[in-house]
Amino acid sequence: MRKIMAIALATVACSASLTLATASEAAAAGRAPQCVKVRKYFNKGHQRYVRLTNLCTQRTSCFTIVVPHHHDPRGRLPKGVTKDIRYGTTGAPRALYVKNVPC
C-alpha cells in the first residue's frame, strides 16, 4: 500500500511541475519583451511628460501610456534611445503606468 501511495504522489508531483513549467513558458511567449523603462514623470508648462528609455539595444520597442478615463497614447522607441513623450495636459489625470506592447 505504501509503495502505491508513493508512486501516486510522485506522479502527481511530476505532472504538477510539468504543468507549471508549460504554463510559465506559454505566458512568457505571449508577452512583449520588457524593453521600455520609465525614468520619470514630469510637467513642463501645462503639458505632462514621461521620460522613457528603450533598454533593448537590438530592436525598436512599442509602448502604451495608460491614463485613466482618457485615450491611451501609443508609441515606438528606437533601439537604445531615451525620449520625453508628451501625453496630455495638466488638466488631465497623470499616467498610471507605461505598458510594453508587441509592435
Image: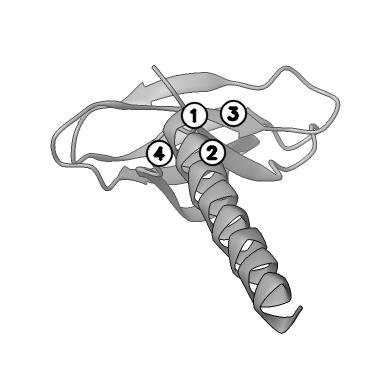
- Residue at the bottom extreme, as displayed: 2
What secondary structure is found at the residue carrying circle 4?
strand
Query: Which quadrant does the C terminus fall into?
Result: top left
Mark carried by residue 74? none
Tell me the residue that label 2 is attached to.
27
Q: Are marks 1 and 2 in contact (CB under 8 Å)?
A: yes
Q: Is residue 12 left or right of residue 14?
A: right
- Kindly identify the residue that appears in the image at 71 percent across and 45 percent down: 96
Measured Cα–Cα span from mark 2 to mark 4: 31 Å
Measured Cα–Cα span from mark 1 to mark 2: 5 Å
Tell me the residue that label 3 is attached to.
87
Mark carried by residue 30? 1
The kind of residue tagged 2 is Ala
How many residues crowd around disc 4 within 10 Å: few (fewer than 14), some, or many (20 or more)?
A: some
Q: Judge whether 41 appears above or below 61 on screen.
A: below
Mark carried by residue 84? 4
Q: Are marks 2 and 4 in contact (CB under 8 Å)?
A: no
The kind of residue tagged 4 is Asp
- Kindly identify the residue that appears in the image at 19 percent across and 29 percent down: 59
